[in-house]
Image (cartoon, helix red, strand yellow):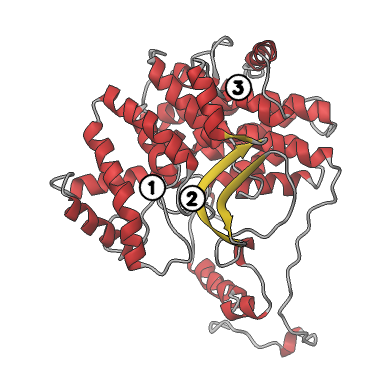
Amino acid sequence: MDQNNFSEITPDILHLANLCEQVNVIDSELFTKYDVKRGLRDLNGKGVLAGLTHISDVRATKMVDGVSVPDHGQLFYRGYNVRDLVEGFTSGGRFGYEEVAYLLLFGDLPTSHELADFRNLLGGYRSLPTSFVRDIIMKAPSKDMMNTLARSVLTLYSYDDRADDTSIPNVLRQCLQLISLFPMLSIYGYQAYSHYHDGNSLYIHQPDPALSTAENILRILRPDSNYTPLEAKILDIALVLHMEHGGGNNSSFTTHVVSSSLTDTYSVIAAAIGSLKGPRHGGANIKVVQMFEDMKNELSDWKDEEAVEQYLRRLLNRDAFDHAGLIYGVGHAIYSKSDPRAEIFKEFVRKLSEEKGLTDEFNLYNTVERLAPLVIEKERKMYKGVSINVDFYSGFVYKMLCLPQELYTPIFAIARIAGWSAHRLEELSNNSKIIRPAYKAISTDRPYVTISARKSKDSKH
């Protein structure tokens, strides 16, 4: 292979790919015939029950006269409604990420002394191995920060003398270190890429152990390390709302599956990062921001609701933006009437938009939030209701915080590492069997054919 053409898709590859696709396509009717739940979900989007968890719960229905009907969504962390958690730490003037991470890991809300000790423990772990930034992060920087994050996590294995020890004390130690290090791994990776690929100045600020996770993100990202209290507060709330979402989401389920094989923590978390990197899971907020940028360019008057509705209809008809037929940030696999994370977030987003002088843009988001479900219901056959999800506003927040789009999904990972850690510890604590779902084989038996008697599908042979 010519090393100069490492990424080239040659005519031979295209030909073989065509053969590969032909033999791998499965008739969709067979899934119905054998009652196979595609994506482990039924027609209503309800997941196939695959496990039990203490960690979190997502609710989107209620029982009325013995029948399950759609209801406003609720999210619980260890039995606590996330609305109450956010109200509790914001009204108390505290940052919530560390407090809620403690809850997810240890099952109860911390006392003031326990929280202080936990914050000190995390602060003490905000230090990478000697020369790690120079030798690992600065070399071969990737344009995708999730790739950089996964590579850094896997490399930390080599610095850990107890890397393969899956005892609970050791795994807890590893998880706490990763929770502390994720902001640095993500942002330093971005700084390296920004410097070497875009020619920007290189900033490597050290974190402050006394600051919260949200404050440290803004401190080490920004050239002057400055931020307002509201900026740090709303980023902290974003981290709390993204840090966990039931054991059935793709990356948390990945954490359970890979942990069940008893592999090391670094391999498990790298696998979860790979899952979250996928645009069907963690990248939706970027699409929301890009969609709104296109919308703003298309609309001469952002207050013209008829024009907004027409644009949304064009989106669904593949006649606008990326022609995918989607209104990004609207709809969810479980929630139908409302996503509690989006509802909690919205008021804080409004306040930040006022601080940034972007109330007109916030009002446009608000208009789309109201009109999009109505347009979708008119244009599409619906099995359940539809509403905005947390991604709808989170990208707008990150834009107002001047976060580069390359860091949108890593910010999600910085939040979700707390949930992944809790799920890994739960899986190991229960000493479960290796997770091995069943796939039904639909191929027919065939007799062996000698090489001289084989007929090629390749027209060239």
**Residue where numbered disc 3 is placed:** 98
**Residue where numbered disc 1 is placed:** 287
Q: Quadrant of the C terminus?
A: bottom right
Q: Residue at x 61, y 67 (%)?
A: 38
**Residue where numbered disc 2 is placed:** 279
For label 1, the crowd category at 10 Å Cα-Cα, with few meaning under 14, some 14 to 19 and many 20 or more, is: many
Q: Residue at x 65, y 44 (%)?
A: 252
Residue 67 seen by the camera: yes
Instruction: Check disc 2 and report its element: helix, strand or loop.
Output: loop
- Above or below, 206 relative to 181: above
Q: Quadrant of residue 263?
A: top right
Residue 60 coordinates in the image, percent (x, y): 54, 51
Please report whichever mark, 2 or 3, sits nearer to the chain's N-terminal start. Answer: 3
Residues marked 2 and 1 touching at CB (< 8 Å)? yes
Q: Residue at x 40, y 15 (%)?
A: 229
Please report whichever mark, 2 or 1, sits nearer to the chain's N-terminal start. Answer: 2
Please report whichever mark, 1 or 3, sits nearer to the chain's N-terminal start. Answer: 3
**How far apart are the alpha carbons under marks 2 and 1?**
9 Å
Who is closer to the viewer here, 75 or 392?
75
Left or right: residue 441 compared with residue 319: right
Q: Quadrant of the N terminus?
A: bottom right
The residue at the far left in this view is 300
For label 2, the crowd category at 10 Å Cα-Cα, with few meaning under 14, some 14 to 19 and many 20 or more, is: few
Instruction: Check disc 1 and report its element: helix, strand or loop.
Output: helix
Residue 426 coordinates in the image, percent (x, y): 77, 38
Residue type at mark 1 is: Lys
Residue type at mark 2 is: Pro
**How far apart are the alpha carbons under marks 1 and 3?**
29 Å
The residue at the far front in this view is 65
